[in-house]
Amino acid sequence: KAGVTQTPRYLIKTRGQQVTLSCSPISGHRSVSWYQQTPGQGLQFLFEYFSETQRNKGNFPGRFSGRQFSNSRSEMNVSTLELGDSALYLCASSLVGEKLFFGSGTQLSVL
Amino acid sequence: GEDVEQSLFLSVREGDSSVINCTYTDSSSTYLYWYKQEPGAGLQLLTYIFSNMDMKQDQRLTVLLNKKDKHLSLRIADTQTGDSAIYFCARRTNTDKLIFGTGTRLQVFP
């Protein structure tokens, strides 16, 4: 069974641009959540989707948004990029249950 | 509070046991997890424990949970150089989000 797949693996953008990251969960998993990892703030929860509905949201500005499609694939979008948005963005998927599995992440650099 | 704290660094000799500790402040957790992160990689789920359990053993890994003291530990028996990585503990809230610790860098030397 394939794991959680995130694309692209690396991204370089400039301030003010927008970016879309993609996540394909493990087959059969309907819950997808997103986390941001930075050296300064560590791992922080962004949001979680289940059956195309956002169930939970972290403390991030409205520039960070996401969605989930009917096949459970998810995208997150960051608009008007700032230098501080440079981070590793991690996606996790789970069945309704206890295990959350993470992808390898998308490393975003904002110049 | 949502704080989950870990010591930053641990160094052990190959073949010894490693014990990584984690404390948290909010007792309303459903599950507690241990993840491993190698350089340039995502998070690998190592093991987890339900909040009403005290201990869980899985091959070389032993998780101990002291609910009274809000203390979680991960013991790695017979530590190998391949175990060198950053280890994160995390608690799952009743709204299903994970709150992560700061991570403990484990260095294994020969």
Image (cartoon, coloured by chain):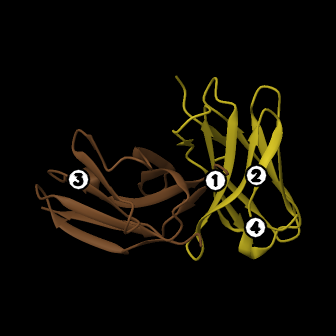
Query: What distance separates the C-alpha of mark 1 from that of mark 2?
Result: 8 Å
The answer to which of A47 and A10 lies nearer the viewer is: A47
Chain A drawing hue: yellow
Callout 3 crowding tier (Cα within 10 Å): few <14, some 14–19, many ≥20: many
Residue B79, image x and y in percent? Answer: 18, 54
Q: What residue type is labelled 4?
A: Asn
Query: What distance separates the C-alpha of mark 3 from that of mark 4?
Result: 34 Å
The answer to which of A42 and B38 lies nearer the viewer is: A42
Cβ–Cβ below 8 Å for labels 1 and 2? yes
- Kind of element beneath mark 4: loop
Please give the name of the residue rendered at 21% of the width and 61% of the height, measured from the top-left corner.
B18
- Kind of element beneath mark 3: strand
Query: What distance separates the C-alpha of mark 4 from that of mark 2?
Result: 10 Å
Residue under label 1: B97
Please give the name of the residue rendered at 41% of the width and 45% of the height, measured from the top-left corner.
B48
| The label number, if any, that marks residue B76 in the structure image | 3
- Kind of element beneath mark 1: loop
Query: What distance separates the C-alpha of mark 2 from that of mark 3?
Result: 34 Å
Q: Earlier in the sequence, mark 1 or mark 3?
A: 3
- Kind of element beneath mark 2: strand
Callout 4 crowding tier (Cα within 10 Å): few <14, some 14–19, many ≥20: few
Cβ–Cβ below 8 Å for labels 3 and 4? no
Residue under label 2: A56
Q: What residue type is labelled 1?
A: Lys
